[in-house]
Amino acid sequence: MLSWAIRRLLLMIPMLFGISLINFAIINFSDPTRTSAANADGRVDPSQSVEAGEAERIFRQTFNLDKPAFFNTRYNIEDDEILWRLMTAQRVYALPSARTGNLKVLEDYGRTIVPHLVRLAKKGRDRKCDYDSYNERWKAERSVWLKHDRPIGDIEWPPPADAPAFDEAFQEIVLELALHRLYANAPRRAHVKYGGGLSKEDAAYNREVRAEQRNLKTLFLEGLKDEEGRRSALAGWSAWSEGHADEWEYSFWRKTEMLFFETRFARYWKRLVSFDLGDSFLYRTPVSTLIWERLHISLILSFGSLILAYLIAVPLGILSARTHGSASDRVVSIALFAMYALPTMFLGILLRDWFATQLGWFPVSKFKGSGYDDMTVVEQFKDVAWHTTLPLITMTVGSLAYLSRYMKSGLIENLRADYVRTARAKGLSEFVVTMRHAVRNSLIPIITLLGASLPAIIGGSVIVEVVFDIDGMGKLGWQAVLRQDYAVILGINILAAILTMVGVFLTDLFYALLDPRISYK
Amino acid sequence: MSAPKSSASYWEIVKTQFRKNRPAVWASRIMFVVFLMATYAPLIAHNAPYWTNHEDAAGSPWLNSLLDPSVFALDVDIFFNLLMGTFPFALVIWFVARGKLRSRLLLTWVVAHVALFLFTQSIREDLRRPVQDWRALTAQEDTSSFYPPIRHHPEDRRSEFVLTPVFSHGKLPAGAAEGAVAPFYILGSDNLGNDVLTRVMYGTRISLTIGVVSVTLYLLVGIFLGGLAGYFGKWLDDLLMFVAQVVMTLPALFLIMFVLSVVKKPSIYHIMVIIAALNWPTVMRLVRGEFLRQREIDYVSAARALGLRDRRIIFRHIAPNTMAPVLVAATFGVAVAILIESSLSFLGLGDPSAPSWGQLLKVGFENSAKGRHLVLTSGCAIFFTVLILNIIGEGLRDALDPKARK
């Protein structure tokens, strides 16, 4: 038994792995930010402001979307690749999707490409950039783009044949763009932590980062002035990057680490294992706090309705099995059958309209009254019970019908079994035969249903919480979905999966304890 | 009904048993009527006249609008509008042909209908006509025209008649022209000025499509994987059962919400695929269990002794014998899919362009003071459809269960 329990617990690890893998696949391969910069037909959305772009960048960094999915080979990027992306991202005649795409890749590279940018800027200054090979690639790609042959915005398309050959200008543009990109990519970001102070090391790190940001900004502003300014700024950048040169020196170990661990996949798991669910951008609070505040509400609703359903369903099932075929049984059966088909939200709205809005017997919404904190414990309990009556009824109705039908058919089958006939033959009273013998055996499959209905119950409180405006986990998740607060969604998803698994495990355990025929080895 | 003859085939016995179950028979009849209502909805409710003699549009604007994407923007509507024309052929086949010929002809009919639909989709844009306000055109003098009984379209959007109560005329705006007649709304109008009855009728199309398509999808996946797991067993069985277990542990509603939030513009196709992706394990486990049972029966050994290939044994010999529980699961599955879709629409995660029942429910919920008729009509539509499907499923289960036979 014990070894079985341990094995089941261990099996939960690969299951959790599988569930997390599904979550990872959804968030990473659909990349929520991918479509926002350029919409479906590749045009850049002019309404997207600088702040939105910055918010998106922070979002990408928090979810590690700026890193490659599985293998990070950014230690051997070629200068030419950077040059190509840098120039194409700015070129008027490039397709907008090519422009935003390249820009995004450059942003994603982050600090990794600082030495490349410094080198490129120097080459530009010395008029040594390889214009010809760039132009070859441009011509090749342009012929592909030309197949899209359509005018885009105000830009003349296809580009005029005598578009200026700009070898000389090219070099200066490379220098200018590289300096811009350096300022966009080089500064580190300060740690942000909601709900709770920063640790001392983090604060020290933040001070250091802010000083560096100021320093780099002066360099950037200097580079904006004129040609002379650009050259002196470049000198500053190159001095700064030499000061940090060890960051971009890749030893064998560093490369291995980068290849496998600086990836979305590895970071995702690191966060999961350390129970770091991130911060909600909507509430500016750690997700774990948000969930913790609401978890008990959802659990009260789910388990309350579960207990209620069992308490009503089992006697009801026994009763209708005993009176099988009679008029009262017919009525009960039909009523239960109808209840099973009732959509939760429909029932919820109806109950709310009749019993809360019109009759005023119950509150319309919320989990507890306004003066909750000043009440005594008994009053608090009464208050919560009063508030949760309608939600609990709404949640119970569906599972109630299902459970009692199951109970009834199981009991009828058991009452026909040979051992029941034997018990009757022994002269036991009908009550003892039913309660002691038949009911006991028909309870067992009902208990297994508990495990099967757990996922539905944990997810099932969403609708009730929305209808009755209860601030539980379900409503939190729902709002997060509508406002695209991914950290919250991910957190709730994982937590709900864990809860479900634990529930299924406990059900199996009960099952084994109740049914002597089952022994787990 | 006479007792089944000893020579009756399995499905004939099932049919006889099913016919003994009066509620189930009535439920399937009602379901057929609901299906007809969904298919022939434009015949009952449409804002274009069947026929008019107005000089700009003499002829039948109704007929012309059926495949027009500016009138019926949804693929589902086009599918059902085509079905209005092709369904009589299916009926003729059903009543004229018998036995194997019937099933072959019906299959041909299905293929032909889908081909016709795909062809229509491919020339979709050529069928677009300028939008016209038929009501205004036919209201002119010396025009006579003949309208469907309900002169509304599900996407009417007559913003002047918002949230009209049940069984009443819309309220004319203050400066309305003299002699203007406000439209009549049998079940009231919604927050955009659409007739609720019309929307419920057209919503049937969407609910039925989502139910049937998603169930078909997961039946295919579930039967295939279940067959693999049950027939070959060993590590494949372990692996597939493990995956099924993981999928069944997922909190469905949260996961669906998650996926739909990533999709950004959810369409009914997304919803179908997600419902299918979360429900295949049930079917897979059913089929696997049946396969494990059937594999040990002698006819399979006989087939193997004849030297038949695995593929033939699986698909020709075992699979047909495992279909009984799958059929029951499919009937209940359609009901569950309809419930899931309406829950999603209610939560604001459905296809915003599709006039589904859940969406009406949501609008009614948001306008709780004036929108009670919305909640009642759409809620009852969902309730009765699910109830009817459940009764049919129950009847099928009893008919297929040898223990329950009388």
Image (cartoon, coloured by chain):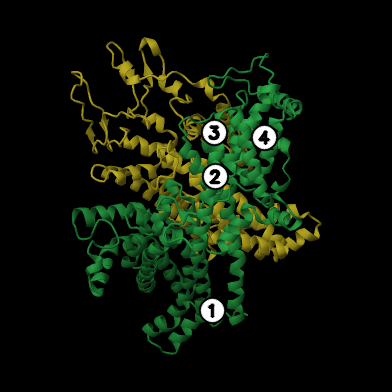
Question: Which residue: 50% across, 39% down?
Answer: A53
Tell me which label, 1 or 2, sits earlier in the chain. Answer: 2
Chain A is which colour? green
Which is more foreground, mark 4 or mark 2?
2
In the rendered structure, are the residues bearing label 4 and label 2 in contact, judged by CB atoms less than 8 Å apart? no
Q: What chain does badge 1 belong to?
A: A
As shown in the figure, which amino acid type bears the numbered disc 1? Ala
Q: What chain does badge 3 belong to?
A: A
At label 1, counting other C-alpha atoms closer than 10 Å, the crowd grade (few under 14, some 14-19, many 20 or more) is some
One can see residue A274 in this view: yes
Picture coordinates of residue B281 (x, y %)?
A: 58, 58
Tell me which label, 1 or 4, sits earlier in the chain. Answer: 4
In the rendered structure, are the residues bearing label 4 and label 3 in contact, judged by CB atoms less than 8 Å apart? no
Q: Is disc 2 on the same chain as disc 4?
A: yes
Q: Which residue is mark 1?
A: A512
Picture coordinates of residue B86 (x, y %)?
A: 52, 31
Between residues A101 and A308, which one lies in front from this camera angle? A101
Q: In the picture shown, does residue A428 fall above or below A511?
A: below
At label 3, counting other C-alpha atoms closer than 10 Å, the crowd grade (few under 14, some 14-19, many 20 or more) is many
The mark found on residue A215 in the picture is 2
| Residue, far bottom | A426
As shown in the figure, which amino acid type bears the numbered disc 2? Asn
Q: Is residue A53 left or right of residue B180?
A: right
Which is more foreground, mark 1 or mark 4?
4
In the rendered structure, are the residues bearing label 2 and label 3 in contact, judged by CB atoms less than 8 Å apart? no
Q: In the picture shown, does residue B58 fall above or below B113?
A: above
Q: Give how far apart the Cα atoms at labels 4 and 3 are.
A: 28 Å
Q: Give how far apart the Cα atoms at labels 4 and 2 are.
A: 19 Å
Tell me which label, 1 or 3, sits earlier in the chain. Answer: 3
What is the number of callouts on the image? Answer: 4
**Which chain does the yellow colour mark?**
B
